[in-house]
Image (tube, helix red, strand yellow):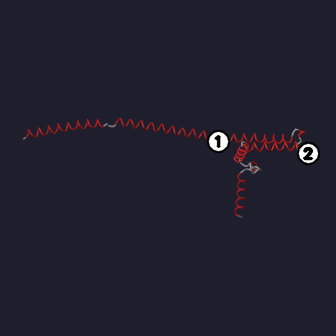
Amino acid sequence: MALAKRSSRSQRNEQRLDTPKGLRSGFGMFQSRDRMGRYSEAFARGMGTPWFLVGLSAFVGVWLIYNTSAPLDAQFDPRSTNFTLLTLILSLQASYAAPMILLAQNRQDDRDRVQIEQDRQRAERNLNDTEYLAREVVALRLAMTDLASKDFIRAELRGLLEELEKDDDADADTENRER
């Protein structure tokens, strides 16, 4: 247990020694850009759910009902001031939501851009492989046309056989004459 505490402290100190003093962030959650991006994506993903809309609607509905029907001295955002506090809260939520959603969209655009580049490279490699294979098939077909066909070989063998038979006949004739 003590070793685990000591190693986590040493890791924190090593991280702090890696960066110049002016670049260190005081906020642990936003130390890296990636961490902030993941946070903004989670935030935007949460705001895009039906449960968030239902919950926000229920919150606003309860707020309005309470501040309309409660006794005047118990209301914290009276109707007579047009629910100023509720308006401020919703404006604050919207002012944080818009940049978070934009950050999440930018990260998604970056991922899409990388994916498109990888797809383009993969398609280029596939095209090069296909062209290479097509050239190889053409080369094999050309090599096959240069090869002797069965008919050509048979004709050549017949020709050679006829020549051999003629030579044998000629040899037999010369032997008969010599005798």
Residue that extends furthest to the right in the rendered view of this protein = 73
Distance from the alpha carbon under mark 1 to that under mark 2: 54 Å
Q: Nearer the viewer, mark 1 or mark 2?
A: 2
Residue drawn at the location 18% of the way across and 38% of the way down: 165
Amino acid on which disc 2 is placed: Pro
Total marks placed? 2
Task: Tell me the quarter of the picture where residue 143 sits.
Answer: top left
Question: 14 or 64, which lies in front?
Answer: 64
Residue that extends furthest to the front in the rendered view of this protein = 69
Residue that extends furthest to the bottom in the rendered view of this protein = 2
Q: Position of residue 55 (x, y in %)?
A: 77, 45
Q: Position of residue 54 (x, y in %)?
A: 76, 43
Residue count near mark 2 (Cα–Cα under 10 Å), binned few <14, some 14–19, many ≥20: few
Residue drawn at the location 23% of the way across and 37% of the way down: 158
Query: Mark 2 = which residue?
Result: 71
The local secondary structure at tag 1 comes to helix
* Comes first in the chain, label 1 or label 2: 2
- The quarter in which the N terminus is drawn is bottom right
- The quarter in which the C terminus is drawn is top left
Q: Position of residue 50 (x, y in %)?
A: 72, 43
- Whether residue 124 sits left or right of residue 179 in the image: it is right
Q: Is residue 58 above or below residue 7?
A: above
Residue 12: image tag: none
Q: Are marks 1 and 2 in contact (CB under 8 Å)?
A: no
Q: Position of residue 152 (x, y in %)?
A: 29, 35
Amino acid on which disc 1 is placed: Arg
Query: Mark 1 = which residue?
Result: 111
The local secondary structure at tag 2 comes to loop
Question: 23 or 115, which lies in front?
Answer: 115
Residue count near mark 1 (Cα–Cα under 10 Å), binned few <14, some 14–19, many ≥20: few
